[in-house]
Amino acid sequence: MWHLAIFDWTADPHDALNLLPAHLEWIRREQLAGRMLFAGPGDNGEKGIIVFAHMTQEEAEALCRSDPFVTEGHRRYTLIAWDVHQALGVGFQTTPVAPMTHTDSRGTA
C-alpha cells in the first residue's frame, strides 16, 4: 500500500524553526531513497502532507516517527493506508482520462 501522512503542529511552528534544516534533509534523503514521493506544506502552513511509496504500515509509521519535527515533539501525524488503483491515467479504467492541467487563481495555465 501507499500511505498518505498528514502532519499537524502540536505547538507554535516558530518554536521549531531551528529544526527546519534537519526536516528538509530528512525529506531529501527519503526522496532519494525512493520512499517518499511527494512532500510539502498545506496552503496555510498548518499541515504537512507526504505521500509515501508502496511499503508496509510499519515502515510508513517508522518514517513518520523519524521526522525531526516529530522526534522533537513539534508535530503529530495521521497515517492513512492508501490502495492506489489509478494514477495519471494508468490503472484499471478503460476510458481515456483527461490530461491534467493546472491553473492558478487567475485561471491561467
Image (cartoon, rainbow, N blue to C red):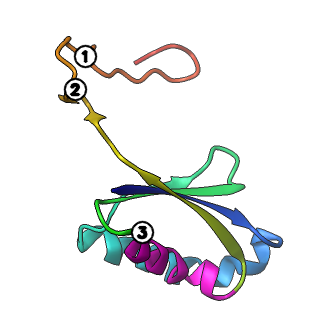
The range drawn in magenta is: 57-72
Q: Badges 2 and 1: C-beta atoms under 8 Å apart? A: yes
Identity of the residue drawn at 65% across and 84% down: 18
Quadrant in which the C terminus appears: top left
Check residue 97 in the rendering and tell me which mark sits there, or answer none.
1
Check residue 89 in the rendering and tell me which mark sits there, or answer none.
2
Q: Earlier in the sequence, mark 3 or mark 2?
A: 3
How far from the left and from the top, in percent, is residue 58?
42, 76
**Where 56 falls versus 103 (above or below)?**
below
Which residue is at the far right?
12
Identity of the residue drawn at 42% across and 69% down: 57
Quadrant in which the N terminus appears: bottom left
Magenta stretch encompasses residue 66: yes
**Is 31 left or right of 23, judged from the image as shown?**
left
Q: The disc labelled 3 sits on which kind of residue?
A: Gln
How far from the left and from the top, in percent, is residue 52?
38, 61
User: 77 or 82: nearer the eye?
Assistant: 82
Identity of the residue drawn at 62% across and 80% down: 70
Check residue 52 in the rendering and tell me which mark sits there, or answer none.
none
Q: What element carries label 2?
A: loop
Q: The disc labelled 2 sits on which kind of residue?
A: Gly
